[in-house]
Image (tube, grey):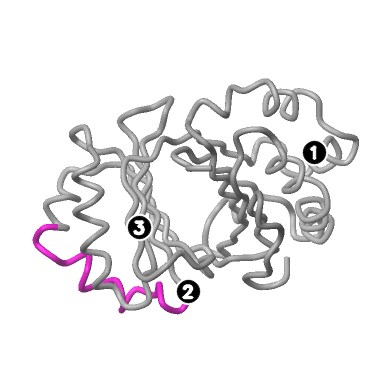
Amino acid sequence: MQATGLIAVWLHVPPHREEEFHAWYELEHIPQVVGLDGFVSGRRYYCDDAFPKFLALYETRDESVEDSPGFQHVVTHPTPWSGRIWTFFGKDRIRQNLARLASVAHGGHPDPGAVLLRAFRAPRPLAEADGLEQGRASAEIPGCTGYRLFRQVRDPGRYLEIFDFAAPEQAAEPALAAFFDRPARRRFDDGAQDVVRHVYAATGTPLVKGRGIRGAGSPG
């Protein structure tokens, strides 16, 4: 299934709740969500320097999947375990529904061991051509395996860039400095507001519909 949508979910739980939180994601929640019609994959990440700390990225057929009956049923009718876990993060949760503008892969499509996420408000509407330009240029970043640009559905002035890496250390600032200092990149970033940039390392076990579960990242 071609995936042109993305649901991104950021969560934070107290450290003493993390063990059960990870077990819930692995054993119940990721299989439940990816099993719904319109979902293509689910992958989890974490960043010790960010709040919320945990991130889940769900590729979807398109941006309409968030409003589908299946997903809305999961949201409004939690299982007993989901209801318990939801009390752990309370209001420390962000969910965004996104539509893909552009995607560029460099040398295959491996499961990323880390992602650099850059969220921002753009001073002008961005289009596929903007994402393709940045995606092609991202091939110059050592270790970068792909680039995606998304537009928020409910706030079209906000965008999300995702740079894929094989390992977290490849997304360290020294490797990124040359890319973000390029004149074309500075023009792209000019006027951006509310910029948030973090590197998230993969955790848990990614699930891809039709391909089963494949191990990647550190234990969750």
Name the mark on residue 147: 3
The stretch drawn in magenta includes residue 177: yes
- Residue at 27%, 69% in the rendered image: 139
Disc with the residue nearer the chain's start (3 vs 1): 1
Disc number placed over residue 166 in the picture, else none: 2
| Along the line of sight, the residue nearer the viewer: 152 or 108 | 108
Answer above or below: position of 81 versus 51. Answer: above
In the image, taking residue 152 as reference, residue 202 lies left or right, namely right
Res 89 quadrant in image: top right
Please say if the residues under marks 2 and 3 sit with CB atoms less than 8 Å apart.
Answer: no
Q: Amino acid at mark 1?
A: Thr
Q: Is residue 191 above or below residue 79?
A: below
Please report the bounds of the magenta region as a residue range: 168-184
Give the crowd class for mark 3: few <14, some 14-19, many >=20 residues within 10 Å.
many
Q: Amino acid at mark 3?
A: Tyr
Q: Badge 1 is on which residue? A: 87
Q: Residue 74: x, y in percent?
A: 75, 30
Please report the residue visible at 65 percent of the width from the left and 59 percent of the height from the top: 206
Q: Nearer the viewer, mark 3 or mark 1?
A: 3
Q: Amino acid at mark 2?
A: Ala
